[in-house]
Image: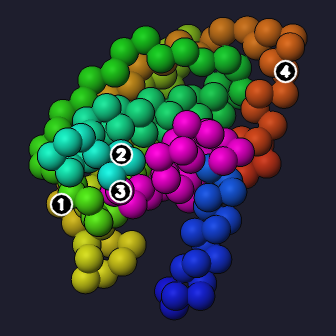
Amino acid sequence: MDNTRRRQSTSSSSTKTAELDPVLHSIGFEIEEVSPSQLTGRLPVTARCCQPFKVLHGGVSALVAEGLASMGAHMASDYRRVAGVSLSINHFRSAAVGDVVLARAAPVYVGRSTQVWEVKLWKEDPSAPGKKGPQISESRVTLLCNLPVPERLKNAGDALKKYAATSRL
């Protein structure tokens, strides 16, 4: 992808992220693919998302995992309200300021009342932008997915519907 197309893609990803998850947007995360079967994105590692040793904060990895899994579960449950009940994360290696982290969330189990999502993070291969390098973490997120949506929040899924690919589980 040439630099002009990459900037345009990054700009549209940033707008999408701002609409879908303002918290992820605030740390610089860019959502790319959105569907009930997979969500992907990228995070340029900056001082804003690092701990004092200038490496990606483990809590940021957890934030990305919970955010992507929650969006996926919301879509996969036909836009019912979801709530995370468990998050387990293993960190394998660090990502430093200047690295780009790639993320992928996919369902492991989609039931009527619960879902389990796996979220993996990798460093981007600096010699091949967009290509996965070493894996840095892996998470499992368990969510309740049969909760009623309160009347005042009936439009909560509208942004996801706007960006979601048509793929179904």
Left or right: residue 59 compared with residue 32 = left
Q: Nearer the viewer, mark 2 or mark 4?
A: 2
Left or right: residue 99 compared with residue 37 = left
**Which residue is located at x 28 percent, y 64 percent?**
99
Name the residue that disc number 1 marks. 134
**For the residue marked with disc 4, what is the amino acid?**
Lys
Q: Specify which label sits upstream in the sequence, 2 or 4.
A: 2
**For the residue marked with disc 2, what is the amino acid?**
Cys
**Which residue is located at x 86 percent, y 13 percent?**
152
* Mark 2 neighbour class, 10 Å CA radius: few under 14, some 14 to 19, many 20 or more: many
Real-space CA distance between mark 2 and mark 4, rounded to the nearest whole angstrom: 32 Å
Q: Specify which label sits upstream in the sequence, 2 or 1.
A: 2
Disc sitting over residue 95 in the figure = none
* Mark 1 neighbour class, 10 Å CA radius: few under 14, some 14 to 19, many 20 or more: some
Mark 3 and mark 2 residues within 8 Å of each other at the beta carbon: yes
Real-space CA distance between mark 3 and mark 2, rounded to the nearest whole angstrom: 6 Å
Real-space CA distance between mark 2 and mark 1, rounded to the nearest whole angstrom: 19 Å
Real-space CA distance between mark 3 and mark 4, rounded to the nearest whole angstrom: 35 Å
**Which residue is located at x 43 percent, y 11 percent?**
85
Name the residue that disc number 2 marks. 49
Q: Nearer the viewer, mark 3 or mark 1?
A: 3
Name the residue that disc number 4 marks. 154
Disc sitting over residue 46 in the figure = 3
Secondary structure under tag 4 reads loop
Secondary structure under tag 1 reads strand
